Image (tube, rainbow, N blue to C red):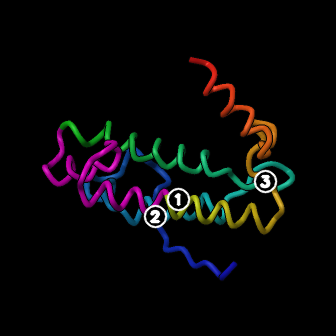
Amino acid sequence: MPVLILPRFAFSNWGMKTEAEATNPELYNYFATFLALVYTFGAEGKWLAHGTVKGYLGALINMAKVKFCATGTDATKLFFTALDKGANTDSHGWYKKLKDRIWRITFQRAKEAGEKMDSSADPLYPEDFAKMVSRAANAQ
């Protein structure tokens, strides 16, 4: 992976964030990049999975939304449409691109490390798929 240089953001005390800072997309770009490429946990130095990074990012944006959206400016309210499914705003487009970038980063990292990507179900083979389709067709 290429060398990563992250800009410095001081967010040691979330309670002191201003509305302008809380609606700055660069803050969330930084946080997502940090979680996807820098942060590890546990003695083994495990990386966060895609869903966890996405969840933490969404939680951070939601905390800002709770704090600023009700009393914020129109621009602030527009920024938080990033979280609205089906919204057709620049903010929503930015957030979707950021989540897609997180997916690409975490997938590439897992692929390079030889990690198993999904352990939620047994592997599905063509013959298994054929059986499922056949059963679905006969279920009526």
Pick whichever, 71 or 140, lies toward us.
Answer: 140
Q: CA gap, disc 3 to disc 1?
A: 16 Å
Image height of 81 relative to 32, above or below:
above
Residue 32 marker:
1
Dot 3: few (<14), some (14–19), or many (≥20) neighbours within 10 Å?
Answer: few
Pick whichever, 62 or 90, lies toward us.
Answer: 90
Dot 1: few (<14), some (14–19), or many (≥20) neighbours within 10 Å?
Answer: many
Lower sequence index among marks 3 and 1 = 1
Q: What's drawn in magenta, residue-wise?
A: 71-99
Q: CA gap, disc 2 to disc 1?
A: 5 Å
Quadrant of the image containing the C terminus: top right
Lower sequence index among marks 3 and 2 = 2
Is residue 72 rendered to the left or right of residue 18? left
Image height of 4 relative to 37, above or below:
below
Dominant secondary structure of the residues highlighted in magenta in the image: helix
Dot 3 amino acid type:
Lys
Residue 29 marker:
2
SS at badge 3:
strand
Marks 2/1 in contact by CB < 8 Å: the verdict is yes
